[in-house]
Image: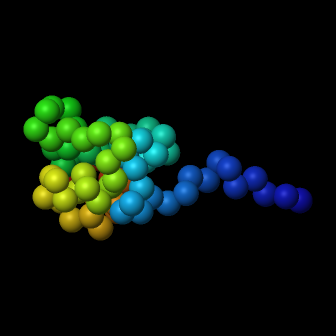
Amino acid sequence: MTTNHTDTPAPSGPETKMVDVAGRNPNLGMILMGYHIGGCTLCGYEPDDTVARVAEDNGVPVTELLRAVREGDIHAG
């Protein structure tokens, strides 16, 4: 029997683009809201920005942001 791995999203890493993270995680907006990322011009980001850049620009350790995204931690920040 062949297992179809296309339903399992690839893990996000520091160089993953935010547009790709958003495509894998429908709760991304809620997760980022916990860190006050996105939603306004001061804390916004571009879809082609990497997770590392968004974390750095917003003063969040990249490992913490990646953990929240991977675990779906909506009440992270």
Residue 23 lies, with reference to residue 12, above or below; the image says above
Residue 9 lies, with reference to residue 26, above or below; the image says below
Give the left or right position of residue 39, taking residue 23 as reference: left
The answer, for residue 31, to whether it is visible in the render is yes
Rendered residue at 20%/32% (across/down): 39
Give the left or right position of residue 1, taking residue 69 as reference: right
Query: In terms of depth relative to the viewer, which is nearer, 44 or 68?
Result: 44
Image location (x, y in percent) of residue 56: 19, 59
For the image shown, how many numbered marks are present on the structure? 0
Rendered residue at 85%/58% (across/down): 2
The answer, for residue 71, to whether it is visible in the render is no
Please identify the residue farthest to the top as the structure is shown: 40
Query: In terms of depth relative to the viewer, which is nearer, 8 or 18?
Result: 18
Quadrant assignment for the N terminus: bottom right
Image location (x, y in percent) of residue 63: 29, 67
Rendered residue at 15%/32% (across/down): 40
Rendered residue at 43%/47% (across/down): 21
Please identify the residue farthest to the right as the structure is shown: 1
Give the left or right position of residue 46, taking residue 15 as reference: left
Q: How is the image coloured?
A: rainbow
Please identify the residue farthest to the front as the structure is shown: 48
Image location (x, y in percent) of residue 37: 20, 43
Q: Please tell me in which quadrant of the rendered image residue 42 appears.
A: top left
